[in-house]
Amino acid sequence: MRKPGIILPLGLLALIAGCGPAPVAITGAGATFPYPLYSRWAHTYEGLSAVQINYQSIGSGGGISKIKNKTVDFGASDAPLTAEELEQAGLVQFPMVVGGVVPVVHVAGVGPGKLRLTPELLAALYLGEIKSWDDERLRAENPDLKLPKQDVAVVRRADGSGTTWMFTSYLSAVSSEWKSKVGADKAVDWPNAARWGGKGNEGVAAYVENIDGSIGYVEYAYALQNNMAHVQLKNRSGKFVEPTIKTFQAAAANADWQHAPGFYLVLVDQPGEASWPITGASFILLHKESTDAQKTSVMLKFFDWCYRHGPADAESRHYVPMPSQVVDLVEASWDRHLRSGGKPIAR
Amino acid sequence: MAPAAETAMAAGPPRPRGNRRAARSSLSDLVFHWATAACAFVVVLVVAGILLELVRHSQLSIERFGLGFLTSNAWNPVIQDFGALSSIYGTVVSTLIAMLLAVPLSLVTALFLVDLAPPRLSHFVGMGLELLAAVPSIIYGMWGLFVFAPFMAKYVQPALYEISGGIRLFEPPMIGIGVLTAGIILALMILPYICAVTRDVFRMTPPMLKESAYGMGATTWEVTRQVTIPYGLRGIVGATFLGLGRAIGETMAVTFVIGNNHKISASLFAAGNTISSTLANEFNEASEEMYRSALVELGLVLFLLTLVFQAAAHLWLRRMTPKGARR
């Protein structure tokens, strides 16, 4: 019993000595949507640089409040803050990746990519104006499908989420009725028809798979993994598009980051023939004034590495990386806004 | 717990036999007394602390909505208008269903295990019960969603609708998710708790009492009804409370199967929500202060709801026990 008493401190000493320079630990928290990618990037980067990045996927709202309270080094959110909100909280914000939200259905005889929906139809389904799958308006857009006489069960997220924010932002953009009755937020007062609330993407996916005649919305990766029946959506240019990394990219390419103060940009309903209409960026939040210049510098190096060397990882996980001209814009904004004791932060 | 404490206090320190021994034992008793009292006080402190924090953090919402919070059915994060009615309704109804199913079932099971089953069978079933009590709630939730909900939709809900003649309580949609399913899952979760405790309570009935009753020619049913159950009543109520406490605050399993909708519906097949499922779903993303405050006030409501239930049970127990027989 005595041996461990000696060996343990010795072992610890050896461990500390063996590590060379003390590892820097960075903590971040926020959006669940980019979590699989951020954790992958953090893991790879740790192997390269001995910088440890801990990312907690607690949700966008949590990420925003944690960075405001300075309990984490960076926050992450799917819903961007407006330029005024950023100013008020002394934060900067920049987009990291772009992803898409996909409506999925579970209707007999309707396979993946078969059902065609217009923005009006999607809003009508979620507002409860279309009650049955054999509704005239649905059949008019889908003459080739044999839609059953079955009640529509509308599924949505029960928890507050960036996914819901993107989805309701889209519906608010395309339907004035939705905008006035429901609005856009991370959680909303859902119309009576949208009564089935699943927890998380996996909860919505499970409800849609279990309920006959259901429609829901999930992040693209979930629809793909679970082989769910996604729909085609009519975009702003009047073309029906399927959700793929190409159509997300097309939507992201339209984004005018240059003229978006504080990178506040809602990417839904973008123009372009190939654009998927429910697309959105996931953002990183930092404090403008850093109390620890070295730490911020390490963080910026990590984000720079993600931009420059991360795209392959992103695409294999169905996220759209930021194009290089946007990366240049972001990094220029770092130089402009980030300070520590009045001095710019070295990278 | 209270009766045990009372007896201990009344008995006081043991009578001294010799001076030296008395001094020593009174010192050790003093230490023992204060050490236990300190531990007991920690419980009170924690409860008071929880109440205080809940009140403090729900201040914003209390000031804005007042008592209307309890009677409002609104839940709109966009315009920051909140009310607890649908959550209170869902919590009470799902707990009620669970108790209605679980209490009689576990009483009967416990009686069987103690009085009727062959010892070996009783042992095995008892082990099964204890294993069941150890299953984490998330497993009940997943099982409820993937296995039990489709079963409900296919067999139970249509059958209930048919048998009842289509009353509003059992109105479609028959999707398998909803308040009734949540109640049944809760019943399954609390059954082993209530049953295990009740079984132990029944076991403590003095054999002498039972034997005397049998000797006087009483049937098994009469012995059960007039000896075992009255003798263990306090314990049964305690066991029920353990179950109620778990059912009323259960979060994960309910969140999976209740449908999470902030609306009150006459049908038990419809989606609803409970206080704890709402907290689990929405606390993370509630970045606005009013939203957060309303959620904390929901927690406060749950706290008070449990208190009301507990007070009601105590009152009921006092009325049930004849004055002279209070132990």
Image: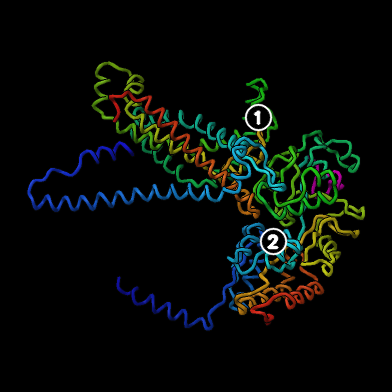
> Which residues are drawn in magenta?
A108-121
For image coordinates 57% across by 48% down, the residue present is B59
Q: Quadrant of residue B68?
A: top right
- The chief SS type of the magenta part is loop
Q: Residue furthest front?
A: B63
Q: Which quadrant: the C terminus of chain A?
A: bottom right
Residue A126, image x and y in percent?
78, 42
For image coordinates 77% across by 34% down, the residue present is A151
Residue A307, image x and y in percent?
73, 73
Q: How many marks?
A: 2
Q: In this view, does B12 lie to the left or right of B203?
A: left
Residue B326, image x and y in percent?
30, 28
Q: Residue furthest top?
A: B217
For image coordinates 87% across by 47% down, the residue present is A118
Q: Mark 1 points at which residue?
A: B267
Q: Mark 2 points at which residue?
A: A77
Q: Quadrant of residue A133?
A: top right
Above or below — where is A162 with respect to A10?
Answer: above
The amino acid at mark 2 is Ser
